[in-house]
Amino acid sequence: MKNILIFLAFYPLIGFSQIPGSITPEKLEKIRKNFNSSDPVIKAATNAATENNLKKLTLNRQNVGKIDHNFKYKVSVKGITDQKNSGRCWMFTSLNVMRPKVIAKIGSDNFEFSTNYLYFWDQFEKANLFLEGIISTANLPVDDRTVVWLMDNALGDGGVWNLFADLVEKYGIIPKSAMQETENSENTDLMQKIIRSKLREDALVLREFIYKKSDKPAIDEKKLQMLGEVYKMLAICLGEPPTKFQWRYNDKDNKLTEYKEYTPKSFYDEYVGVKLSDYVLLMDDPTHDYNKLYEIEYDRNMFEGTNWKFINLPSTIIKEYARKSIMENEALYFSCDVGKQLNSEDGYLSLDNYDVESLFGVKFGMNKKQRIQTRESGSTHGMALVGCDVDANNKITKWQLENSWGTKAGHDGYLTMTDEWFDQYMFRIVVNKKFVDPQTLKILEQIPLKLPPWDPMFEADK
């Protein structure tokens, strides 16, 4: 880079047009001739594109009105949640996978967990993890790649299943009525910016403490003081999480039960009772070898928590496990690149939804691996996978997703995706081990291959 800058410093002597790699008048003239603005097709496309929205222009009209939102196999789910303006899709998805179990137990259709409760502890634990990361890297230069990554990711909404599992194991879970949403839980951006700014300031203080050879008790005490300030800011914005609460509900006969006192952990044990270690995370990441176990460094929300571990498998295998789960009435955690080829008005994910090639006369040809490598595609959103449909030959044709964007988004809050879209833009599911064959589960015995947190597949989750 330095040599290039030195070379460019002499451009007045040789002229821009003689610098290798620059756009010369001759090159520009060739491009203009190839464009051929007098071509009737180019003129028509220009007339349309300069006056209209590109999404409407590229919409494949052959798909419109032909979408079937019915499914042969569907998990018994009821009610649509809304994450509002927050990045908590992974948390809503995880809770929505568990929600049918509570609905079936109490017989009430309108039950919802408190996402705000788990969100508070997620943010608090992430702050602690960040400060511990700063302490462990304090002897590295501030521009070291790991330190830079920590500073960039001081605090965020993003996450995956293992973060949810660790939170529930430590803090339990509560109904929404015991800790409602707030303005700042539903619109998290500014609160996070404020706390993130304070954490970065704290990082410099801790690094200075360690540079001056402060003893460990002094460092620990300083960190505890910093966490106290984070707790205070979170409690002011989100409310303080309850340690105990009273709860009652209308049962299937519309009879109001008596109040009962719970702790968050006793509530989980009584109404969910699922052993979260019975679930396994599967991914289709063609940038890494299949049939291997991987671990992502720093991809957790607790210092003592579990890093994101996954078995890498082709989507063709993952789909069969998903089908089995749905047929047994068990929803799955699912994440994907939801913005690709999404017809949001119809709630439809199909590779044929939009045709940009015909409008521009330009070929787009990257495969899934290439899209990941170039940062063109990655997991951007989590939803609950709740349905699948098959043809007369029992071949899967499409899938249904329960979203967390409210009932007005998509098809009454749901999305329908084709099986082909699943192959290209699905990145992971979480499934109960009982639906996975023993040979695949044996991969869990491998020593995981550790990947850095800046791997292109995982940057989108931050």
Image: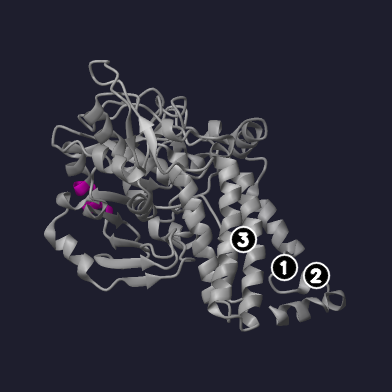
**Mark 3–mark 1 CB contact (< 8 Å):** no
- Whole-percent x, y for residue 403 in the image: 40, 35
Q: CA distance from mark 3 to mark 1?
A: 44 Å
Q: How is the image coloured?
A: one colour
Per the rendered image, the range of residues in magenta is: 315-321
- Secondary structure at badge 3 equals helix
- Identify the amino acid type marked 3: Leu
Give the residue drawn at x 51%, y 70%: 133
**Mark 1–mark 2 CB contact (< 8 Å):** yes
Asked whether the viewer can see residue 330, the reply is yes
- Secondary structure at badge 1 equals loop
Q: Quadrant of residue 198?
A: bottom right
In this view, the residue farthest toward the right is 12
**Which is more N-terminal, label 1 or label 3?**
1
Q: Nearer the viewer, residue 90 or 167?
A: 167
- Residue tagged 3: 199
- Identify the amino acid type marked 1: Ser
**Which is more N-terminal, label 2 or label 1?**
2
- Whole-percent x, y for residue 223 in the image: 57, 66
- Secondary structure at badge 2 equals helix
In the picture, measured across the screen, residue 416 lies left or right of residue 155, that is left
- Identify the amino acid type marked 2: Phe
Give the residue drawn at x 35%, y 67%: 295
- Residue tagged 2: 16
- Whole-percent x, y for residue 173 in the image: 36, 43
Q: CA distance from mark 1 to mark 2?
A: 7 Å
- Residue tagged 1: 22
From what the image shows, is residue 288 above or below residue 190? below
